Image (tube, rainbow, N blue to C red):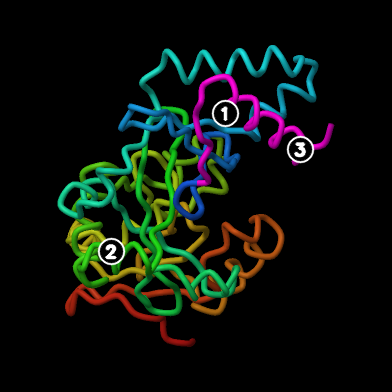
Amino acid sequence: MNYEIFKTNLFNTIETRLGAKVLSGPDDISCFEMNGLSVNACVISIPGRNFYPVIYPDLYFDKYRKGSTFEEIVENVLDVIRYTNEDTFNFDEISDYEKAKEHIVPRLVSYSVNPEIFERRAYVPYLNIAVVFIYVISSKEDELVSFAINDEQVRTWGVSVKEIFRDSIETSTKLFPPLIESIKEALPLIREEDFRPFYVLTNSRKQYGAACVLYDNVLSDFAEKIGESFFLIPSSVHEMLLIPESFDIRVSEMRQMLLEVNDSVLKPEEVLSDRVYYFDMKNKKLDFASKD
């Protein structure tokens, strides 16, 4: 049984056994686990319940491939739906922006990866990248369940994208506080001879932490701490490298390093940018780094 047949059979069985309805839900609903795996998710609509359980057919299919029978998986899913209150989604809550905004966070993404998504997704241009908005369903220690906000949802709320941008930064700062570590703290196994005075900016989850550059005062506070302006290398959607201006390295060298990482280390969806940025301590402004 391939994945599509498995998923269809699973959904049909759930609907028959529970009298429920399996919904595709909002666009791009997904679960990002701490091991870096992103899997699809769906919500289950059960008559008489306002809260909708979230399940992950990809993960159940993986169990099926590893030897679990289809009936064992069905019983497992039914138990999750019947008895757990975790990973539930309230469709009524998202309709009220004042409630929904407490779940919305910004995420930095590249324009070049899946450019067609910007035809329907709410976003704000930022330098040469884009800020999209994510609704967090649940944020547990080992997984993050979320979906992207699209234009239709923004119209339903009757608010501006500018307002969502402002509110999302406030929410994200509370849900995912910024974290700045030296490269040695972030990579404790690095050899002493390879150590460089670099820093890593991410968030407390170390997932999609590049968005921390949007947080109020994060960059200016860091500049004050080190006493100078600094460069930023967008090493992935999950973090940025911060390099003090006094460190003897050319912009062309940093960009070459970035391009090599983009081409040989990162997955396409993890690539953020091919440009190096510069934060001016005096003007408190982030912009493109000047060429050598």
Q: Give the mark, 1 or 3, whose residue is nearer the N terminus.
A: 3
Q: Quadrant of residue 93?
A: top left
1 and 3 marks in contact (CB < 8 Å): no
Q: What distance separates the C-alpha of mark 2 from that of mark 3?
A: 34 Å
Q: Which residue is pictured at 52% across the width and 65% down the height?
A: 272
Say if 81 sits above or below 43 in the image: above
Number of the front mark, 1 or 3: 1
Which residue matches tag 2?
A: 156
**Label 2 with label 1: CB-CB less than 8 Å:** no
Q: Residue at x 52, y 58 (%)?
A: 236
- Give the residue type at disc 3: Tyr
Depth check: give the residue in front, 123 or 81: 81
Residue 68 in percent (x, y) is at: 75, 15
Q: Earlier in the sequence, mark 2 or mark 1?
A: 1
Element at label 1: helix
Q: Is residue 246 above or below residue 212?
A: below
Q: Nearer the viewer, residue 189 or 120?
A: 120
Decide which of 3, 17 is in the foreground and name it: 17
Relative to 95, 24 lies left or right: right
Rendering coords of residue 57 (x, y %): 63, 33
Figure label count: 3
